[in-house]
Image (tube, rainbow, N blue to C red):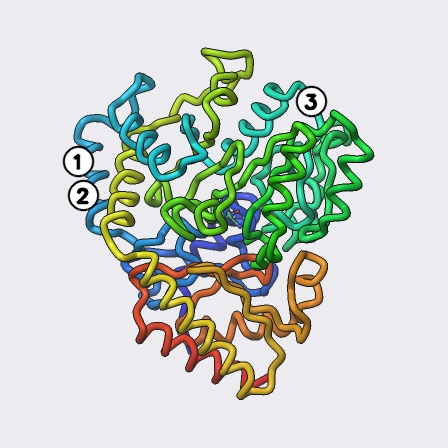
């Protein structure tokens, strides 16, 4: 029996002062029941709670920790930067270095603007796409989550889907009237939307590998189709690579699938675990941003020296190591192990994976979009989540989130996970 008395005490206190006791809804365990634990320390692939319990972590701070927690090179870089000041609101050299790295590794990105979160990145990129094309409508896909900006909080994934509020209260209908929501992996729906809205669609925003309703992949040719249909209609293609950027490859999903979007959004990995976001793309589009152009976007802490230093250290380490080879090997081992464990236990599971991102759904049918994802047995997921937690393995506390591997995970960790999953699924 795992004791979490310190976490329980802290959560009771947190509930008095913080709505729901958490600063982001997905942390609250409400989809799986129970209470969140409070973390004291994280290192490598593991986190320790305030009661001293150890967990093998597949949340990885929701994606950023691709090198594992507290990577020595990131800690060193942040310490060194902090000695010179934590924020200037004046340009600093780190901004130039990180911008150059992003532009060098992603050929589609000729210029990039830093901000503070993925939400800021997508919100700003949408505004830029509208300003550049002088069109109002955007297409997004059901179950994709692009942060919590008003115009994008329509049929959104992640916590919005988890808690049954995919269209948030507090967003006036007028703010979303220009957002066209379509099913993912459905070409005819996209063609019909363009036909119904001639010369009105500024762009399509898409997570190239949607990771906010669990994880499912684009069907072969689908991203190519999105590229073609946007170009043919004078619209922009926006890749939300907040999760996939520098995770599926140094050049993100666009390198992995060989697609060139017009604009891309980043976050998570490029901040090395510090708060960051960025959006970038073709120079002629990016130059529409203030101070050069008419589209306004700003931020006191944008380009923050600590976040930039952490991001540079993370990307340098990714480039200098065989990280993506290792992540693929670990991912393949996890996938094979989990499929084997499910089969042996006689439990229908769809284990979707792309590189170091994964999700298991408790359904016998393939999952290609959010409607398929909704067929997963969520009562079973709850049992699975708590069973794994009891085995010391921390998965995202929702069926509608992706799992993340890091280079700090080992073959032994995968074996431990598969053994635990087999044990838990045998109790179903
Ligand atoms: N995009 C992450 C969830 N899918 C963010 C985590 C959060 O919302 O707290």
- Which residue is the site of mark 3? 135
* Residues tagged 2 and 1 counted as in contact (Cβ below 8 A): yes
Give coordinates of residue 276: x percent, y percent: 40, 36
In the drawing, what numbered circle is on residue 389? none
Q: Is residue 346 above or below residue 240?
A: below
- Which residue is the site of mark 2? 76
Determine whether the residue tagged by mark 3 lies in a helix, strand or loop: loop
Determine whether the residue tagged by mark 1 lies in a helix, strand or loop: helix
Give coordinates of residue 23: x percent, y percent: 50, 44
Residue 118 visible in the displayed image: yes
At a point 54% along the width and 40% down the height, the residue shown is 239
* Residues tagged 1 and 3 counted as in contact (Cβ below 8 A): no
Q: Quadrant of residue 54?
A: bottom left
Give coordinates of residue 384: x percent, y percent: 54, 74
At a point 41% along the width and 26% down the height, the residue shown is 111
Residue nearest the viewer, comparing 191 with 406: 191
Give coordinates of residue 72: x percent, y percent: 20, 50
Locate residue 13 relative to residue 367 in the image: left or right.
Answer: left
Front disc: 2 or 3: 3
- Give the distance between the C-alpha atoms of the residues marked 1 and 3, in whole angstroms: 45 Å
Locate residue 80 relative to residue 360 in the image: left or right.
Answer: left
């Amino acid at each position: 029996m795992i004791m979490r008395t310190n976490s329980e005490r802290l959560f009771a206190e947190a509930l008095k002062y913080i709505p729901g006791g958490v600063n982001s809804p997905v942390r609250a365990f409400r989809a799986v029941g129970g209470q969140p634990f409070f973390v004291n320390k994280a290192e490598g692939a593991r986190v320790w709670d305030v009661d001293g319990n150890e967990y093998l972590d597949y949340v990885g701070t929701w994606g950023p920790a691709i090198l594992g927690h507290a990577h020595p090179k990131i800690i060193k870089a942040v310490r060194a930067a902090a000695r010179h000041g934590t924020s200037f609101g004046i340009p600093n050299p780190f901004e130039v270095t990180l911008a150059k790295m992003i532009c060098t590794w992603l050929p589609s990105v000729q210029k990039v603007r830093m901000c503070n979160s993925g939400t800021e990145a997508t919100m700003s990129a949408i505004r830029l796409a509208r300003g550049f094309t002088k069109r109002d409508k955007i297409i997004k896909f059901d179950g994709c989550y692009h942060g919590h900006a008003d115009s994008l909080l329509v049929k959104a994934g992640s916590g919005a889907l988890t808690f049954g509020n995919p269209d948030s209260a507090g967003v006036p209908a007028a703010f979303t009237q220009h957002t066209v929501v379509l099913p993912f992996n459905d070409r005819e729906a996209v063609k019909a939307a363009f036909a119904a809205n001639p010369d009105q669609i500024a762009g399509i925003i898409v997570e190239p590998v949607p990771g906010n309703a669990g994880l499912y992949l684009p069907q072969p040719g689908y991203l190519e189709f999105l590229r073609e249909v946007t170009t043919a209609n004078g619209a922009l293609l926006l890749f939300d690579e907040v999760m996939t950027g520098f995770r599926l490859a140094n050049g993100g999903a666009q390198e992995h699938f060989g697609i060139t979007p017009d604009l891309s959004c980043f976050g998570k990995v490029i901040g090395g675990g510090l708060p960051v976001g960025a959006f970038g793309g073709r120079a002629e589009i990016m130059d529409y941003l203030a101070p050069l152009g008419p589209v306004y976007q700003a931020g006191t802490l944008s380009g923050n020296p600590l976040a930039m230093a952490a991001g540079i250290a993370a990307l340098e380490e990714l480039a200098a190591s065989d990280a993506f080879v290792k992540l693929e090997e670990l991912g393949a081992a996890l996938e094979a192990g989990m499929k084997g464990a499910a089969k042996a236990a006689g439990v229908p599971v769809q284990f979707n994976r792309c590189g170091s991102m994964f999700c298991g759904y408790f359904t016998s049918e393939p999952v290609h979009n959010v409607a398929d994802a909704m067929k997963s047995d969520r009562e079973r997921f709850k049992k699975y989540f708590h069973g794994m937690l009891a085995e010391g393995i921390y998965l995202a506390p929702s069926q509608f989130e992706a799992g993340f591997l890091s280079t700090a995970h080992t073959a032994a960790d995968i074996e431990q996970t598969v053994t635990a999953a087999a044990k838990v699924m045998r109790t179903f």
